[in-house]
Amino acid sequence: FDSGDCAMLQRQHKNSWQNVNLPPVLPEDPIFVVNIADCLSELSQNYVPSTLHRVMPVAGGTMPRNCLALFVGLDPKEHLHFTNGDRVETYENWRKKRIAKSQKVLQKKNLT
């Protein structure tokens, strides 16, 4: 649930941003929004996709939104076995490559 009204969670879908509308009160059967990380997405060959998302301010809002972020990583020396079977690398190596890829995307956006 998200009783706040000062910000809106959005996810990217194709070339546009879509609002993720959550109920304002806690229902009997709670709803959890889980953003799957890139590592799990890549390990599953995108069977479990990660989602590009953002939180945008909402004009006139007065109540803060509720958010709990939990970041979990693997042991840096842990070997990742990708589902295609021919690729194995340490989590640390994968993480460094993923950070470099993100930096290239940001640099490209700053140049345009």
Image (cartoon, rainbow, N blue to C red):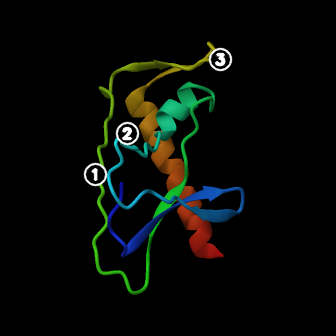
What is the C-alpha distance between the residues marked 2 and 3? 37 Å
At x 71%, y 56%, the residue is 14
Above or below, comparing residue 63 to residue 72 in the picture:
below
Give me the disc on residue 68: 1
Q: Earlier in the sequence, mark 2 or mark 3?
A: 2
Circle 2 sits in a helix, a strand or a loop, which is it?
A: loop
Above or below, comparing residue 1 to residue 79 in the picture:
below
What is the C-alpha distance between the residues marked 3 and 1? 33 Å
| Lateral position of residue 51 relative to residue 8, left or right | right
Q: Position of residue 12 (x, y in %)?
A: 61, 58
Circle 1 sits in a helix, a strand or a loop, which is it?
A: loop
Q: How many marks?
A: 3
Q: Earlier in the sequence, mark 3 or mark 1?
A: 1
What is the C-alpha distance between the residues marked 1 and 2? 18 Å
The residue beneath circle 3 is 84
Above or below, comparing residue 9 to residue 40 in the picture:
below
**Quadrant where the image shows the N terminus:** bottom left
Q: Amino acid at mark 2?
A: Asp
Give me the disc on residue 29: 2
Q: Nearer the viewer, mark 2 or mark 3?
A: 2
Above or below, comparing residue 55 to residue 87 in the picture:
below
Q: In the image as oriented, which residue stretches furthest toward the bottom? A: 60
